[in-house]
Each structure stands twice: as structure tokens, then as C-alpha cells.
Image (cartoon, rainbow, N blue to C red):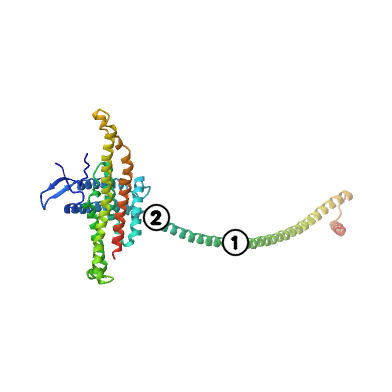
Amino acid sequence: MEKYLDFVTIDFWEIIFTWVNLLILFLLMKKILFKPIKNILEQRENEVNSMYSDAENAKNSAESMEKEYTRKLADAKNEANEIVKNATRTAELRSEEIIRTAQEQATNIKEKANKDIERDKINAINEAKKDISEIAVSIAEKVIEKDINEKDYDRLIENFINEMGDSE
Amino acid sequence: MNIEVNGPKIYYEIPILGGIKITESIVNMWFVMAVTVAVCIWLTRNLSVKNPSKKQIVAEKLYLMLYNLVKDVMGEKYIKFVPYIGSLFTMSILGSLSSLFGLRAYTADFSVTLGWALMTFIMIQANKIKHKGVWGYIKSFAEPVAFLTPLNLVSEIANPISMAFRHFGNIASGVVITSLIYGALASLSKTVLGFIPNDFISQIPIFQVGLPAILSIYFDLFTSFLQAYIISMLTMVYVSGAE
């Protein structure tokens, strides 16, 4: 014969069992369902927060780097301008110096050439005088075909040369 | 024919302390607990922060729904009640729904619902004492005027009783009505098919197919959910309101 409780009844031990069962389920669910999910959600939240702060930091550092680079670029431009200016000035000075030196050298060369020409001219005249006197003597010998004395000879030459020098 | 509507079956009686009865309700409760724990273990296996699986998304969604409900109803400082409310709700709804699997719903057992209601009652009193102190708690029954003390006491004690009877009554009425309808449909089938001389065919309860299923949508699904929601909600409101 199966026994039943009454349809509406209060059974003390059943209430106790209900409490114990609810407590056990509460503890189990807390441990195996609520805690792990809560942890996962917290981890995810932390991760998202750290991602945001990382992004913020990265943005800040990028901005500061950009400022620094802009400043450095401007500095570099100024420096380059300075260098170009300096180089131009140096080049100008140098070219002026080169030109001056060249002019001096040219002047020197010209002077030296003039002196050489002068000397060569004198030499050539002397040479020519000598040659002419010899030619004159030999012509005279041929013309006269006789020996003139030393005295006449010298006088004749002198006269000749002087005449030639005048006609020059 | 006779229709019997019984309380829970007594499986075994431990013959100590005046007889501890192991009833159908308690055994069904253990069964529900085992299923719940198994589902919880399955849901929380391989949890990951990134790329959560579909079941993890479902578990998280359910958790957040409960979390937000408790936060909205009870407030931030009672957020530790989330697991208790969760387990109470689970216990209640699965207990009622277990009738769909042919078990006797243990929420149709007054001792069970009274147990839960008494739990809430104890929490309410504990929370009052915590906030007002013992003397303040005793004094609070004489407010706003002293002669209302009996009325205050009655209303305080009526709380758990009404909670217990509300839950019990809704589910138990479903059980009763379902039994009545099955009985009625069986005798209707018998009347309609009674002219068939074959004993076997005339016993087929054809009218039991279909109609009880439609009724069970209301009595089992809807009422089960509603009562689980109500007992959880009332627990939250009463406990957090007892300051």
C-alpha cells in the first residue's frame, strides 16, 4: 500500500529538507555558475579598460612625438639654411681669392714675358749687328778685293753701323 | 470512476526523531538539483575572455539579466543576493516544470513553498534587526502608534503564509485541474467508444490527446514561470524593503 502525505499539510522535516536543498543548490550554483561567470565578466571589463588606457597612452605619446619631430624638423631646416648661407659666403670669398691670385699671377707672367721679350730683342739686335758687320766686311772685301789697313776698316764699319742704327 | 488527488508519495520513513519522511517532493528536488548542477557545469566549461562560445554567451546573458534585475529591484548593496535569487528561481521554475516530465511538481507541496517563504521571512527579520538594532526592531512593531502592534504582527506573519500559499495554490490547482480533466476525458472517451464490443479499443482514451497539452501550456509553462518570478521578486522586494 503506497502512502501519501495529505494534499495540504505541513511536514516539519520536509521544510528542513527544503532549506538544506536550497542552501546546497545556492552554494553549488554560486561556486560553479555565478563565480566563474562573474570572474570572466570582470576580466573582460579589466581587459577593455586596460585597452582603453593603453590606447590613450599611445595617443598621448604619439602626439608628443609629433610635436618633437615637428620641432626637430624646423631646427633641421634652420640649420640647413645656415649651412647653405655659410657655404655660399665661403664660396664667394674663395672665388674672389682665386680670381685675385689668378690676376696677380697673370700680371707676373705678363711682366716676365715683357722682360723676356725686351731681353730677346736686345740680344737679337746685338746678334744682328754682329752678323751685319761680318756680312759687310765680307762684302767689302769682295768689292775692294784688297786689304785695307786696320784703321780704315774699323772706321768704315763704325760708319756703316751708325747709318744702319739711324735708319732703324 | 474515482479521481484521487494525493499529496506527495512517501518513499521511505526513517524511524528516528518522530519519523523523517523521504517524500516524492524531496527526491524530485534532488533530481532537479542534479540536473541544474550538471547544466551549470556544462555552461561554465571552457570559459574564455575572448571569443566566447555560444553557450558562454547564453550563460553570461542569463547572469547579466539576473544581475540587473537584482540591482534594479534591490539596489547595489544587495548585489550579493544574486546567487540566492538565482537558485531560488531555478529551484522554483524547474520544480514546477518537472511535471512536464511526469514527475510530481514539488512546488505543489505546501511544505516546500512554506520552507522558501519562511526563508524569506527569516531574511526580512534579520535585515530589519541588522538595520535597526534589536530594540529598534522590537519598537518598529509599535509604529506609528502603539495600538497597531497586533495589526503589525499579523501583517508580518501573513507575509510568508501568503507567499507560500500563493505559490503552492497556483501549482497545486494546476495539478488538480489536470487530474480532473484527464479523468473527465477518460470517462468521455469511454462513453463515446463504449458501444464498441472490443474491450481493448473501447478503453482507448482518445480525448486525452491534444486538449490536456493546450491546458498544460497555461498550467505548467505559464504558471510555473510566473510563480517562480513572483516568489523571487517578492523575496527581493521584501528583503531589500526591510530596513
Q: Which one is in front, A76 or B210?
A: B210
Q: Are marks 2 and 1 in contact (CB under 8 Å)?
A: no
Rendered position, B210 above or below B67 = above
Q: Which one is in front, A90 or B45?
A: B45
What kind of element bears circle 2? helix
Kindly identify the amino acid type of the residue bearing the numbered disc 2. Val
Q: Going 53% across and 62% down the picture, which residue do you hit?
A: A71
For disc 1, the chain is A
Question: Residue A48 got which mark?
Answer: 2
Q: Going 24% across and 63% down the picture, which residue do you hit?
A: B154
Mark 1: few/some/many CA within 10 Å (<14, 14-19, 20+): few
Task: Pick the quarter of the image with the N terminus of chain A.
Answer: top left
Rendered position, B61 above or below A109 = above
Rendered position, B186 above or below B154 = above
Residue A110 is situated, as x and y percent measured from the top left of the image, at: 73, 59
Residue B76 occupies quadrant: bottom left
Q: Which one is in front, A104 or B225?
A: B225
Q: Gap between marks 2 and 1, in whole Å? A: 49 Å
Q: Which one is in front, A78 or A159?
A: A78
Mark 2: few/some/many CA within 10 Å (<14, 14-19, 20+): few
Q: Is residue A32 visible?
A: no
Q: Going 30% across and 36% down the picture, which residue do you hit?
A: B207
Kindly identify the amino acid type of the residue bearing the numbered disc 1. Asn
Q: Nearer the viewer, mark 2 or mark 1?
A: 2
Q: Residue furthest top?
A: B198
Task: Pick the quarter of the image with the C terminus of chain A.
Answer: bottom right
What kind of element bears circle 1? helix
Q: Specify whether disc 2 shares its chain with disc 1.
A: yes
For disc 2, the chain is A
Q: Which residue is mark 1?
A: A81
User: In the displayed structure, does residue A76 sit left or right of residue B105?
Assistant: right
Residue B94 is situated, as x and y percent measured from the top left of the image, at: 28, 47
